[in-house]
Image (cartoon, helix red, strand yellow):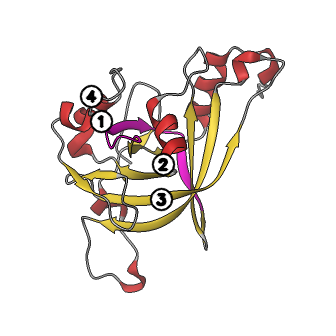
Amino acid sequence: MTISFDFEALSERERYKLMIGTIIPRPIALVTTVDEHGRINAAPFSFFNCLSADPPILALGVENNPDMSFKDTGYNIRMTEVFTVNIVSFSIAEAMHVCGSKYPRGVDELKEAGLTAMAGQKVASPWRSRKHPQHSSAGVMSRLSSGNPVRSSWARSSMLIIATVSSILKVCASIPGKSMPSRALAAIPARRSVTVSRC
């Protein structure tokens, strides 16, 4: 039996659940940014993936708040146009959930989660945690806003498409072709909105 879903007829929550339940598995990115005052922010995102290797391009989907104000990650990227993607491993799964909690603007989520921040390389503004297996520092190449001006509930997301500046691997080995085994990263794949699983 084939079931067809008309996204025009679905609620925002129904569209979200269909997207995260069918496009799997996806990596989870703990995105670290700084604001114009140098204050660190960290938040997990599962709407993230790579688009190209040459040039190296990543895509990150960031939602606005329900009142259309920017969330901290989106605001900071707009102010500085740089950020760092930290691939989430099972060793920091609990800390990732702490970073995903709601905090007032200006609170350092890495510190709240017990993670240690380090200065970014090549891109000066982003920070990264010592405990992440892989880090990709990036600068914004293009920013595309998505949404339907007629249907306000479709106007909450803003896709930030960026070019990777550097990739720093914590776990590495001598591998022909400089490939990176997924088991060495021990990355958490996003499968559902409330659970994570091992591939």
> Rounded to the nearest whole Å, what is the CA distance between mark 4 and mark 1?
5 Å
Q: Given the current orientation, which residue lies at the most extreme front position? A: 37
Residue pictured at 29% horizontal, 48% vertical: 89
144 left or right of 32 in image: right
The residue identified by callout 3 is: 138
Q: Nearer the viewer, residue 98 or 199?
A: 98
Residue pictured at 46% horizontal, 38% vertical: 45
State whether residue 30 appears in this view.
yes
The residue identified by callout 2 is: 80
92 left or right of 78 in image: left
Sequence-earlier tag: 4 or 3: 4
Sequence-earlier tag: 3 or 2: 2
Tell me the kind of residue under disc 2.
Thr
The residue identified by callout 1 is: 96
> Rounded to the nearest whole Å, what is the CA distance between mark 1 and mark 3?
20 Å
Residue pictured at 72% horizontal, 23% vertical: 154
